[in-house]
Image: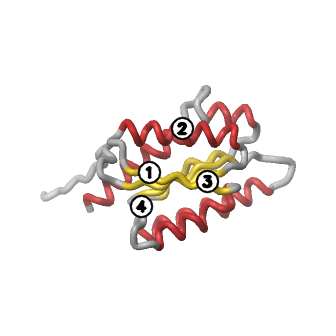
């Protein structure tokens, strides 16, 4: 039997990453951004472009523009925080943004890492931005690095 196995390598050397981060819920998103940037630096200190947008809703069109350019980044990290309120708005927003980002990822064959929190409370958000449950910005950066490596090997 002939078998080829592809595993992602955890190096970002020589790559260009874009990080698109929401200003909405900035107490949380600034921590996600710090975690993502730290992981990128630890894994090869690649070129990084950070783009700030008003809210999570604005992330997909900005990423679409980035990926449609000839000088597009190798991978994108989307960071935001959609806090649940008293209406179903957050669930609808999260689903729409998630679907849009998945569509862009498959359309352009470039990793678009999900670092968007959808907590019920600010305490839950802060826990996932570095307090108790790790930092989801870090996790998104690691996923982007590994997925990009897999794509590059195919």
Q: CA distance from mark 2 to mark 4?
A: 19 Å
Q: CA distance from mark 1 to mark 3?
A: 13 Å
Earlier-in-chain disc, 2 versus 3: 2
Residue at the (69%, 60%) spot, across then down:
57
- Label 4: which residue? 73
Where disc 2 sits, the SS reads helix
Image disc number at residue 21: none
Task: Judge by depth and name the residue closer to the eye, 126 or 71.
Answer: 71
Q: Are marks 1 and 2 in contact (CB under 8 Å)?
A: no
User: Where is the C terminus found, in terms of image quarters?
Assistant: bottom left
Residue at the (45%, 72%) spot, across then down:
69
Bin the neighbour count of mark 1 within 10 Å (Cα to Cα): few under 14, some 14-19, many 20 and up: some
Q: CA distance from mark 1 to mark 4?
A: 9 Å
Count numbered badges in the picture: 4
- Label 2: which residue? 34
Task: Judge by depth and name the residue closer to the eye, 91 or 59.
Answer: 59
Earlier-in-chain disc, 1 versus 4: 1
Q: Are marks 2 and 4 in contact (CB under 8 Å)?
A: no
Task: Judge by depth and name the residue closer to the eye, 61 or 87.
Answer: 61
Image disc number at residue 52: 3
Q: What coloring was used for the rendering?
A: secondary structure
Earlier-in-chain disc, 2 versus 4: 2
Earlier-in-chain disc, 1 versus 2: 2
- Label 1: which residue? 48
The residue lying furthest to the right in this view is 86
């Amino acid at each position: 039997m002939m078998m080829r196995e592809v595993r992602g390598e955890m190096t970002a050397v020589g790559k260009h990453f874009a990080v698109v981060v929401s200003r909405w819920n900035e107490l949380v998103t600034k921590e996600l951004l710090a975690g993502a940037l730290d992981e990128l630096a630890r894994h090869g200190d690649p070129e990084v472009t950070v783009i700030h947008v008003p809210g999570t809703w604005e992330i997909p069109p900005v990423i679409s523009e980035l990926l449609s350019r000839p000088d597009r980044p190798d991978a994108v990290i989307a960071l935001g925080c959609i806090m649940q309120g008293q209406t179903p708005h957050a669930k609808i927003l999260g689903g729409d943004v998630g679907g849009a980002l998945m569509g862009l990822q498959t359309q352009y064959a470039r990793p678009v890492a999900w670092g968007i929190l959808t907590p019920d409370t600010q305490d839950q958000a802060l826990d996932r931005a570095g307090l108790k449950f790790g930092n989801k910005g870090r996790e998104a950066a690691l996923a982007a690095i590994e997925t990009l490596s897999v794509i590059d090997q195919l």
